[in-house]
Amino acid sequence: MRGNNLLLSLFCAVAAIPSFASTPPKLPRLDWTPRSDWINVKTDVTPAAVGDGKADDTESLQNALVLLGDVPGKRTTVYLPPGTYRISRTLELKQKDGIAIIGHGRDTRVLWDGPGGEGDESRMFWSNGSPCSRYIGIVWDGAGRANTGFDHDSHNLFETEIDHQCEAFINCRGCGLRIGHNQSIPGAQATAETTYDNCLFCNCDRGAAVLTFNDYNHTFAGCEFRDCGTGVYGGKGCNFYVRDSHFVTSRVTDVLSMAEHGVSLRRCTSVGSRMFFQQNSIATAVVQDCRVSGWTNPDGAISLNYGPVMVFDCAFEHGPGRDAAIRTVDSQKLILSNNRYPGSSALVKRSGTPPAIVPAGKLTASLVSAETSYLREV
């Protein structure tokens, strides 16, 4: 194991977070009573996993994945007791339907000690066709070397109805979580109808990336994105929804959408990022009841291009100047209602037809602080 891995595997380097940022939240500590039909990586596979952060547990964890769904017993759950499981090559889950991988939240960590670089050999976990599955309570720690933490890259089996809960995707050079990689090759399939609940994305170039066509209906709820280049990256053809999520110090933007289907951001908060939302797409977008503070981009917190957008019940504060918080091309259809940017010269900058203004409704903004975080620690 390389000597600097322990330093690189910190949840977030303190030096990477500006002084105004709050203390990073932790995943909850989950408490399980193991079932007899679970595959315990420390007792039910050979060789048994150690989980001390020093032994190489790759073979143990891979053997547990192979056992999933096999007879006798048709066991469908892999259980990782508390510990740090060092791995040196990619774990592959291949064409297993209706499975679960369960850990103890912040007390169960999978730590990368394999190759660096941008190739497929530098991904920690490869979901190769596993619909109707659940992943609960795992910290995927790329240790500053892995390109990808968790990769939904399915060949020959369409992935749908997947839940990620109480997971962390941290310290990855590329994507903490990636959907749609290699989808142009023969036999490749999409991943759709997937939820990410109470997940932490930290210190990755892209926290979560939904890349291409047919990667539909990805929902991020109650998540936290910290010190990433881009928090949620949406490529062409996909669509996604982000709600009740918190962003801190994104270097490029909190959310980027190039989607060709509708996206929405609802009740999200942002502190100290370069930008909050960037849209480069013909698709519709809705930004509702969001609060953005301290963005650093002089051209605004929100940049809109092409597609029709509705922004309502949002508040902006502490921008880099008095200029507009929202920039948009002149021909774009833009509907605004009940947005606030105290002390600014204007909310929106565009030289053509002014946006449509709709009076505020009876139910208005609910957020009172951009510091609001939704990640549950218990």
Image: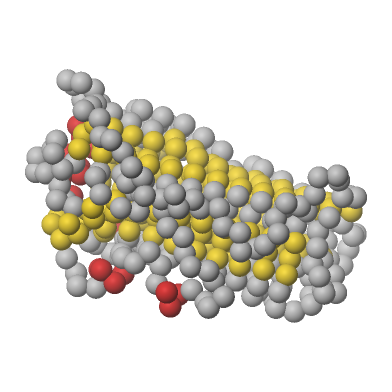
Whether residue 48 sits left or right of residue 21 in the image: it is left
Give the residue at x 86% y 45%. Answer: 361
Number of numbered discs on residues: 0
Say if 246 sits above or below 261 in the image. Answer: below
Give the residue at x 17% y 57%. Answer: 52
**Residue 272 position in % (x across, y down):** 60, 71
| Colour setup of the view | secondary structure
**Within the image, what quadrant is residue 200 found in?**
bottom left
Say if 291 sits above or below 101 in the image. Answer: below
Whether residue 281 sits left or right of residue 336 in the image: it is left
Which corner quadrant holds the N terminus?
bottom left
**Within the image, what quadrant is residue 4 found in?**
bottom left
Whether residue 177 sits left or right of residue 58 in the image: it is right
**Residue 326 position in % (x across, y down):** 76, 64
Give the residue at x 42% y 74%. Answer: 14
Q: Is any part of residue 265 visible from this angle?
A: yes
Q: Nearer the viewer, residue 3 or 300?
A: 3
Say if 71 sits above or below 102 in the image. Answer: above
Q: Is any part of residue 90 visible from this angle?
A: no
Give the residue at x 19% y 59%. Answer: 53
Q: Nearer the viewer, residue 257 or 369?
A: 369
Whether residue 4 sits left or right of residue 277 in the image: it is left
Q: Nearer the viewer, residue 235 or 309?
A: 309
**Residue 31 position in % (x across, y down):** 33, 42
**Residue 339 position in % (x across, y down):** 81, 59
Residue most extreme to the top: 72
**Within the image, what quadrant is residue 316 found in?**
bottom right
